[in-house]
Amino acid sequence: MAETATVPAVGVTVGRREGAISESTSRPMIVVDAGSRLRLITQCDHAHLAAEILSLLPALADEPLRDVLLRATRRHDDGWQGIDAAPPVDDRGRPYDFIRLPWELRTEIWDRGTSLAGIQPEAALLIAEHAVELHRESSSEDGRAKTLLELVEARRAELRERLGSRAEEVSALYPWLKGADLLSLIVVNRWTGRTFELDLPERHALEPWRARLEERMLRLQPFPLAGATTLHYPERSIENRSYRDTVDLGTALARAPWRSDTVTIRSWG
């Protein structure tokens, strides 16, 4: 039987069985071990795929803040752009994952990601909600994580004060961003053989949505679309080996051609 992973509403921490989700959500670049190759997807490309999935949903067609939600979803990982462009390597010669990424880099990424110049405050608030959600659990285990959480909580508080009475309405949409983020991660990481549940706002979803990936087919229940829809996202692959340093890894990335991968969204049955 496929294992079920529930994705709670905003404010509830994902359980330990979803540890792989939390780790991959926060990697400087999404790195998927594919045997002799490593598949590489940038955080920004993953975020764009999340927004594309969200844009298809009829449940949001009449949502007054739909454009805000899509903008926030598309840009929620913009803070990772510098790291994606030149990913550092750890002492094993591997691209850093979230667990080993130096805290000064994490703080810089989320400070930049929650203070985006030119983005409207409503979208920035949703991105700040995401940053708080990602770091809430780890803050109880590491003082440096607590410092980072305090930074993004302060940024969220500033945005809530700026938006006044609109802040609650905006924040109520965060489960959509969180759900779309997970759906995209399921696809790019190829998390097959598991069933995921997404808790969405009750006014849009009377029961939890379920998602399951089979090869390159993302199956949803309830199925929100008129028919099967295929989406594309870019990725690169490099040799699965130990890299001497950031320059060695960067050279391999520069030589790796971009290719388009696909996912088809279909009904559950």
Image (cartoon, rainbow, N blue to C red):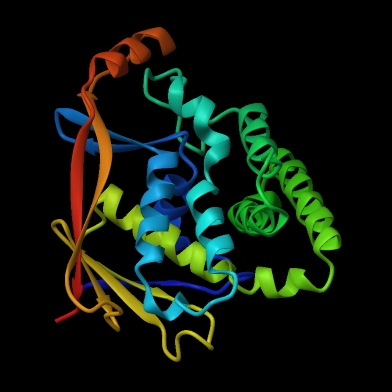
Is 4 drawn above or below residue 101 in the view shown?
below
Residue situated in front as seen by the camera: 191 or 225: 225
For the N terminus, give its image quadrant.
bottom left
To which quarter of the image does residue 174 belong? bottom right
Left or right of 262, for residue 98:
right
Q: How many marks?
A: 0
Residue situated in front as seen by the camera: 137 or 178: 178
Left or right of 259, for residue 61:
right
Residue situated in front as seen by the camera: 143 or 212: 212
For the C terminus, give its image quadrant.
bottom left
Is 197 drawn above or below residue 207 in the view shown?
above
Q: Residue at x 50, y 38 (%)?
A: 98
Extreme residue in the bottom direction: 206
To which quarter of the image does residue 29 belong? top left
Left or right of 253, for residue 79:
right
* Residue 106 x, y percent position in the rendering: 62, 34
* Residue 215 x, y percent position in the rendering: 13, 57
* Residue 23 x, y percent position in the rendering: 46, 46
* Residue 234 x, y percent position in the rendering: 27, 38
Q: Residue at x 36, y 8 (%)?
A: 244
